[in-house]
């Protein structure tokens, strides 16, 4: 029910309602599961509140999922929602940094959705650029005019 409400907030870009719903969950001691967290990140992103969206990637002190792990409910979909928030806000450098964390294994791994959000198209992986060349090929071409 909460994820549905958050999805509705995302459609209309209502960041204040997202904050109110998250505060209500905190008051009753309900931890955020992956679906609820992703919905909230997406809603904040669509409302232009990328700082709030990014804050939800990092669990708060004392916040743990069902198994006791603080990071179990932050998955690739949550990171994709955060990447979308950053891209919508024009935070290109931060989105590249977040992608680098995902590629380095410091966060959940990127998937096809990640590459579409980053403008690389399906099937294009690390080192690929939006024009279809690899970073290595592009630097080699620029080194030899």
Image: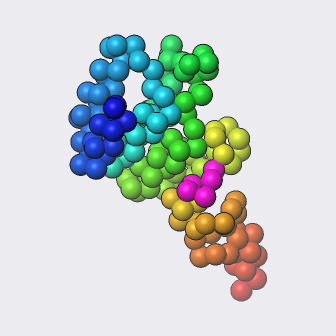
Between 136 and 65, which is closer to the camera in this rendering? 65
* Magenta-highlighted residues: 110-114
Q: Residue 30 in the image: x percent, y percent?
A: 41, 18
Quarter in which the N terminus is drawn: top left
- Residue 76 lies, with reference to residue 22, above or below; the image says below
Residue occupying the far bottom of the picture: 145
Residue drawn where x is 59% and y is 27% of the image: 71
Q: In this view, does 126 lie to the left or right of 63?
A: right
Q: Residue 78 in the image: x percent, y percent?
A: 51, 41
Quarter in which the C terminus is drawn: bottom right
Residue occupying the far front of the picture: 1
The image quadrant of residue 137 is: bottom right
- Residue 140 lies, with reference to residue 124, above or below; the image says below
Q: Residue 32 in the image: x percent, y percent?
A: 45, 26
Q: Does the magenta stretch include residue 77?
A: no
Examine the residues drawn in magenta and state their main secondary structure: helix
Residue drawn where x is 63% and y is 50% of the image: 110
Between 55 and 92, which is closer to the camera in this rendering? 55
Q: Is residue 47 visible?
A: no
Q: Residue 122 in the image: x percent, y percent?
A: 61, 66
Residue drawn where x is 44% and y is 34% of the image: 37
């Amino acid at each position: 029910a909460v994820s549905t409400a958050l999805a509705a907030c995302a459609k209309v870009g209502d960041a204040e309602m997202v904050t109110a719903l998250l505060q209500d969950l905190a008051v009753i001691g309900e931890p955020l599961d992956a679906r609820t967290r992703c919905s909230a990140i997406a809603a904040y992103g669509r409302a232009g509140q990328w700082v709030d969206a990014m804050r939800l990637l990092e669990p708060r002190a004392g916040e743990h999922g069902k198994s006791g792990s603080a990071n179990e409910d932050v998955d690739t979909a949550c990171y994709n929602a955060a990447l979308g928030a950053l891209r919508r806000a024009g935070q290109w450098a931060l989105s590249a940094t977040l992608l680098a964390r995902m590629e380095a294994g410091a966060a959940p791994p990127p998937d096809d959705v990640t590459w579409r959000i980053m403008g690389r198209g399906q099937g294009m992986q690390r080192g690929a650029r939006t024009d279809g060349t690899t970073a290595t090929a592009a630097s080699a071409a620029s080194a030899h005019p």
